Amino acid sequence: MTMQAAHSALPLSASLSDSYRRVRARTEELCEPLEVEDYIPQPTVDVSPPKWNIAHTTWFFEEMILKKFLGGYRVFDSDFAFLFNSYYNTVGDRTLRDHRGDLSRPTVKRVFEYRRYVDGEMAKLLADESLFSEPGSELEELVVLGLNHEQQHQELFLTDLKYTFSVNPLFPVYRENYVPEEASEPPASGDGRFITLEGGIVEIGHTGGGFCFDNELARHKVYLDDHSIATRLVTNAEFLEFVNDGGYRDHRLWHSEGWDWVNREGVASPLYWYDRDGEWLHFTLGGLRMLPMEAPVCHVSLYEASAFAEWKGMRLPTEFEWEAANERFDWGKRWEWTNSAYLPYPGFRKPEGAVGEYNGKFMMNQMVLRGASVVTPEGHSRPTYRNFFHPHLRWQFTGIRLAK
């Protein structure tokens, strides 16, 4: 079977072994500041507890790889297939998504024992060079997919934990002075903030060697009209002008669903913003701090991004405009909302089996984000990467780039 969910350029098991150890070690480094009590809470359905995140990534290697490719493999605990499956119906029943935080057992200690057990079994598998005699084999692609999957959960580990800490009235600190979202945007000067691109036919989608997810395939042609796209992200200072001008109270700026959401949820500013006697603060994994005005705005929904663009007399770029222009601006500080629905590219085909559930079944009622964020693992993203979320979500490090 040729797998579309992962395309790898790693030819040797030794390279895979090194990558495996590095990625798995990074997850445990993220756990170092936590106390046992931090591993379990789940304050909302979209946020998974740290214990579940680190167990689920381990389950992925056990379920998708070890059971199939390591002869005589014995599962660590037969209950874990139910407890730590995320959404793979092909695999079987699972813990409901909104009940992941109900699991006081298995203990955190037991989950780390699970990680060590699976890592030991994976080391045996990766040491068998006969299994990797042909670059691009199904096994190699599954291992690379598993590593990229774990990197996705490293980012989720931080974004989920930030939300969980934010609902604690003590505003806990994860790491002192850990505030990557406070990096400033360069100042705007003259007309240099926008670049103009001529219309025409461009090619979109992944090409060449290296890893990609199946939703980045197949490469195809798209026609774009003349347009301009911002070289900078919208800053906190700029978004605060929108807040102060009554942007959250002006129905003319909002999509109908967005206006319903604002009123239903009582939204009046980006997530984690706090107005304390006229002084704006924001919550970070380094604690509650003064809002940095020249940093890109963060934790906004598509509804808010679209309303801000409308207020400015502009719009959000499409994902194709973003991809075509990405070399002309610096990206990677925020996941950037686009005006494109998350849909399959022409020629997209889901792989068979459980791996086919990785992306394709979510191509409905979600919007595409491009780029990466300040908590995306280094080297994980690329210009063709297609992240996707429902338009009301904002617990990820999401921001705004304008187009016109």
Image: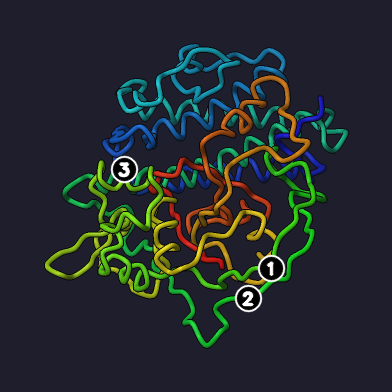
* Nearer-N-terminus badge (2/1): 2
The residue labelled by disc 3 is 260
Q: Position of residue 216 (x, y in %)?
A: 70, 44
Q: The C terminus is located in which quarter?
A: bottom right
Query: Could you say whether the residue bearing mark 2 is in a helix, strand or loop?
Result: strand
Q: Residues within 10 Å of mark 3 (few under 14, many from 20)?
A: few
Q: Are marks 2 and 1 in contact (CB under 8 Å)?
A: no
Task: Please name the amino acid that badge 2 sits on.
Answer: Ile
Q: Residue furthest left?
A: 277
The residue labelled by disc 2 is 195
Q: Position of residue 187 (x, y in %)?
A: 47, 82
Quadrant of res 197 = bottom right
Query: Could you say whether the residue bearing mark 1 is in a helix, strand or loop?
Result: loop
Which residue occupies the foreground of this view, 365 or 13?
365
Per the model, the C-alpha gap separating discs 1 and 3 is 33 Å
Point 41% across, 30% down: residue:
52
Q: Position of residue 222 (x, y in %)?
A: 75, 53
Q: The N terminus is located in which quarter?
A: top right
Query: Which marked residue is nearer to the observer: mark 3 or mark 2?
Result: 3
Asked whether, in this view, residue 177 is left or right of residue 355, the answer is left
The residue labelled by disc 1 is 226
Task: Please name the amino acid that badge 1 sits on.
Answer: Asp
Per the model, the C-alpha gap separating discs 2 and 1 is 11 Å
Per the model, the C-alpha gap separating discs 3 and 2 is 34 Å
* Nearer-N-terminus badge (1/3): 1
Query: Could you say whether the residue bearing mark 3 is in a helix, strand or loop?
Result: helix
* Nearer-N-terminus badge (3/2): 2
Q: Residue furthest right?
A: 134
